[in-house]
Image (spheres, rainbow, N blue to C red):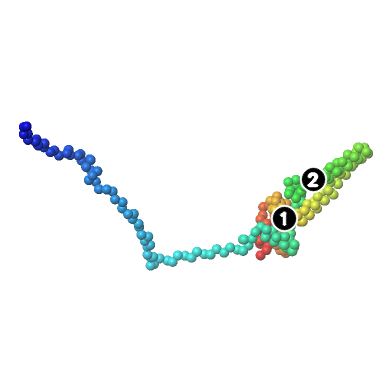
């Protein structure tokens, strides 16, 4: 058996890594810095600065808090005591769109007089029929109109002055006014252009 000496294999260093790969090992890890807070620094007052002006107090008059119901009750009281009068424009209130007029009431008179005139014409001839027609027109323009006006006036004073909702509808429509009855005072508050609540406030002081 031949004696053989072991062959020494030279050791070689591992290949050097590129610089861009070494950067990931040499770069330090990112650190999280604690958040910085800014203290609330209040500037010291200026020695010569004038003191702040006080805010003036706003006084609310007591009548500003009055409701429409309370003012409506005061209006009825002023009317009952004779300090304020309710004037009505009956011609305006008899309009077909009026909230206090009913077309059926007027039609009852018209239809009744027409039937009466037709009956007279049929039974007594055209001469008496024409006279009956003229009398019916005159009767409607005098008696019927007067009764309708009186009924509307009674409805306003007995029903509308007791109901705020109906009073507001009437005021928005018009044909009604409030008149001061004191001597030397002729103030008139007419619907719908004037404000009846302001009028009552002035008269209730």
Q: Earlier in the sequence, mark 2 or mark 1?
A: 2
Is any part of residue 205 visible from this angle?
yes
| Residue in the picture at 90% in, 38% down | 121
Q: On the rendered structure, is 86 left or right of 38?
A: right
- Residue 28 picture location, percent across and down: 25, 48
| Numbered marks: total | 2
Give the CA separation, mark 2 to mark 1: 23 Å
**Picture quadrant of residue 50:** bottom left
Q: Residue furthest top?
A: 1
**Picture quadrant of residue 133:** top right
Q: Is residue 12 above or below residue 181?
A: above
Question: Where, quadrant-wise, is the N terminus in this rendering?
Answer: top left
Q: Is residue 58 above or below residue 144?
A: below
Residue nearer the viewer, 6 or 36 = 6
Q: Which mark is residue 163?
A: 1
- Residue 4 picture location, percent across and down: 7, 34
Question: Where, quadrant-wise, is the C terminus in this rendering?
Answer: bottom right
Q: On the rendered structure, is 96 left or right of 56?
A: right
Is any part of residue 171 visible from this angle?
no
Residue linked to disc 2: 104
> Disc 1 on helix, strand or loop?
loop
């Amino acid at each position: 058996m031949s004696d053989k000496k072991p062959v020494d294999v030279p050791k070689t260093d591992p290949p050097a890594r590129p610089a861009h790969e070494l950067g990931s090992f040499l770069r330090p890890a990112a650190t999280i810095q604690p958040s910085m807070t800014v203290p609330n620094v209040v500037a010291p007052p200026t020695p010569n600065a004038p003191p702040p002006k006080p805010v003036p107090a706003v006084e609310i008059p007591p009548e500003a808090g009055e409701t429409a119901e309370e003012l409506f009750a005061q209006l009825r009281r002023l009317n009952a005591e004779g300090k304020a009068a309710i004037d009505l424009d009956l011609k305006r209130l008899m309009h077909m769109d009026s909230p206090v007029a009913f077309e059926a009431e007027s039609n009852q008179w018209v239809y009744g007089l027409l039937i009466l005139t037709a009956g007279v014409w049929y039974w007594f001839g055209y001469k008496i029929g024409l006279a009956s027609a003229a009398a019916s027109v005159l009767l409607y323009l005098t008696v019927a109109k007067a009764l309708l006006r009186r009924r509307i006036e009674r409805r306003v004073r007995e029903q509308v002055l007791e109901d705020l909702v109906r009073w507001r509808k009437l005021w928005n429509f018009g044909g009604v006014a409030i008149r001061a009855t004191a001597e030397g005072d002729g103030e008139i508050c007419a619907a719908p252009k004037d404000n009846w609540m302001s009028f009552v406030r002035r008269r209730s002081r």
